[in-house]
Image: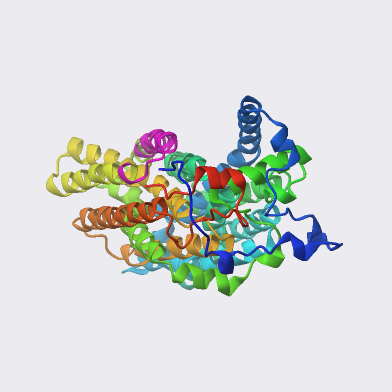
């Protein structure tokens, strides 16, 4: 939780990517407009009464939400659809036409994650340095859309492996990039709900991919001499490219460099983030370094605990890579199985939104992550313990919401726990997301029914350890002691007045 406490002297100056405004007196460079970190709130913010400030901030957040969130959700729907449509393509004839045998299909699924893991940290560090997500993310989307559509042209197992590897390599730019992107726009107590809104793209994709695949399989198989699975890749890849071009005109960059904000809105957008974590966020590319951010992240024990926690959650949810096949074990035909994959994802969207909204309203994180995981554990046990159709489908209805309801809050907890500096946050987000997805490589070959509960319990244990650590760190802050990554400074040097009054506390 974030409470109001006085704070002690800062020892963070060596980690501060900003330099004193004194160094820029008389500077006529493009960076000369950078705000003086020793000053108080900008004139516009100071001129607002408390009521006016609340109203202005609400209007600003609504404007940001309207321009940012819908575009990111649609882009992530296509990202997840292009990544996982191979599961639906399997039921639409891919395995038969390419003569896949043994574990070749599993290898085609897992090879995507090899490229996906290799590129995440470099991509996020480059995005942080480049500073233009409005160009970088849509450009990556166009490339992966082309690769996804090109999957329709493969004629052999080798061709499928090559396409899948490069698809994962390019898609790696998107999700960790979006998590970092959101953290540069929203305060810590706004972040979980926005992370949930972003991740709803994957859940909506899971719901509608089965419906789209059912429509294509039932109506286009054999059209123009192409099997249904080829049409699936062509249609979804082309739709991705169209949305990517639209995104160029919609997405912003960072608060300081976004043209559709007025000067007053820019001041407020920048200042409210500075108040939240005690320092300005992304200023310009000159103050973002690749290796320094990665080094700071690697030295923080909190990142490693978060990494194992997210690994446990993602590993317990790896069954979704094969969800159409899992549902098919109920005994229905391919079209019915594809249709039955939709309800669990629809329920997951509802529960994820509700849980994340409440987590942001209360500022609590631990129970909003662990309680849904207990439901997931029960669902996995039920699936393994029965062969009856109704109980098995009930377990499937609970699996997806049980895993991903807490997962979206856990994603926000990363930026809550490692808020500064931006290069460190970018590296931590990418590294955690990369390692957590390693389970998708081996899970493609075998997903034992007993593994789901074990991984969920691992995530619960890590969340518990992290909560104890953060509570202990908050107590140190109460006593005015130095804590790495927390902005302090009773003297006020380099710390905004409002941040000093309120005091930084880790959300637990």
Q: What secondary structure prevails in the magenta region?
A: helix
Q: Position of residue 344 (x, y in %)?
A: 34, 38
Magenta-span inclusion, residue 353: yes
The residue positioned 51% from the left and 59% from the top of the image is: 9
Magenta-span inclusion, residue 57: no
Q: Position of residue 142 (x, y in %)?
A: 65, 56
Model colouring: rainbow
**Left or right, residue 241 beside residue 472:** right
The residue positioned 58% from the left and 43% from the top of the image is: 498
Q: Position of residue 342 (x, y in %)?
A: 39, 38
Q: Over which residues does the magenta segment extend?
A: 344-367
The residue positioned 42% from the left and 59% from the top of the image is: 481
Question: Is 166 in front, or is 347?
Answer: 347
Residue 293 appears in the rendering: yes
Q: How many marks?
A: 0
Question: Is 228 in front, or is 295?
Answer: 295
**Left or right, residue 83 beside residue 63:** left
Question: Is 202 in front, or is 507?
Answer: 507
Q: Is residue 34 above or below residue 166?
A: above
Q: Position of residue 489 (x, y in %)?
A: 54, 55
Residue furthest out toward the left: 385
Question: Is 438 in front, or is 239?
Answer: 438
The residue positioned 76% from the left and 62% from the top of the image is: 22
Residue 98 appears in the rendering: no
Residue furthest out toward the front: 491
The quadrant of the picture occupied by the N terminus is top left
């Amino acid at each position: 939780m974030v409470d109001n406490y006085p704070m002690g002297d800062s020892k963070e100056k060596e980690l501060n990517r900003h330099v004193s405004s004194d160094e820029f007196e008389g500077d006529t460079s493009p960076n000369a407009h950078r705000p003086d970190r020793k000053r108080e709130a900008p004139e516009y913010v100071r001129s607002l009464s408390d009521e006016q400030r609340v109203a202005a901030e609400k209007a600003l957040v609504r404007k940001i939400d309207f321009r940012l969130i819908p575009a990111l959700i649609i882009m992530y729907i296509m990202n997840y659809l292009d990544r996982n449509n191979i599961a639906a393509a399997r039921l639409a004839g891919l395995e038969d036409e390419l003569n896949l045998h043994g574990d070749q299909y599993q290898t085609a699924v897992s090879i995507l994650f090899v490229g996906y893991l290799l590129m995440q940290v470099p991509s996020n560090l480059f995005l942080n340095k480049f500073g233009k997500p409005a160009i970088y993310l849509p450009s990556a989307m166009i490339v992966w859309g082309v690769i996804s559509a090109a999957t329709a042209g493969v004629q052999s197992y080798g061709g499928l492996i090559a396409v899948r590897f490069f698809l994962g390599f390019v898609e790696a730019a998107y999700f960790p990039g979006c998590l970092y992107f959101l953290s540069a726009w929203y305060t810590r107590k706004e972040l979980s709900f926005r992370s949930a809104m972003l991740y709803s793209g994957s859940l909506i994709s899971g719901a509608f991919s089965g419906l789209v695949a059912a429509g294509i399989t039932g109506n286009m198989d054999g059209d123009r001499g192409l099997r249904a699975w080829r049409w699936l890749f062509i249609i979804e890849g082309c739709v991705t490219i169209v949305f990517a071009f639209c995104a160029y005109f919609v997405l912003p960059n960072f608060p300081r460099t976004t043209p559709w904000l007025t000067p007053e809105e820019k001041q407020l957008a920048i200042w409210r983030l500075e108040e939240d974590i005690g320092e300005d966020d992304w200023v310009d590319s000159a103050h973002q370094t690749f290796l320094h951010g990665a080094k700071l992240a690697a030295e923080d024990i909190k990142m490693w605990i978060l990494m194992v926690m997210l690994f446990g959650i993602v590993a317990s949810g790896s069954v979704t890579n094969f969800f159409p096949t899992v549902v098919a074990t109920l005994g229905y035909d391919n079209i019915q199985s594809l249709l039955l994959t939709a309800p669990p994802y629809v329920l997951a969207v509802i529960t994820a939104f509700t849980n994340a909204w409440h987590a942001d309203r209360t500022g609590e994180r631990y129970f909003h992550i662990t309680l849904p995981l207990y439901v997931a554990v029960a669902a996995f046990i039920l699936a393994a313990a029965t062969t009856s159709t109704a109980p098995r489908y009930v377990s499937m209805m609970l699996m997806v919401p049980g895993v991903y309801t807490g997962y979206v809050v856990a994603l926000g907890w990363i930026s809550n726990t490692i808020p500064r500096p931006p290069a460190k946050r970018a590296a931590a987000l990418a590294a955690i997301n990369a390692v957590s997805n390693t389970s998708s490589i081996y899970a493609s070959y075998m997903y034992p029914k007993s593994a789901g509960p074990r991984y969920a319990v691992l995530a619960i244990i890590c969340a518990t350890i992290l909560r104890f650590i953060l509570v202990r760190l908050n107590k140190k802050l109460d006593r005015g002691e130095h804590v790495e990554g927390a902005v302090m400074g009773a003297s006020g040097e380099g710390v905004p007045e409002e941040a000093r009054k309120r005091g930084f506390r880790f959300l637990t």
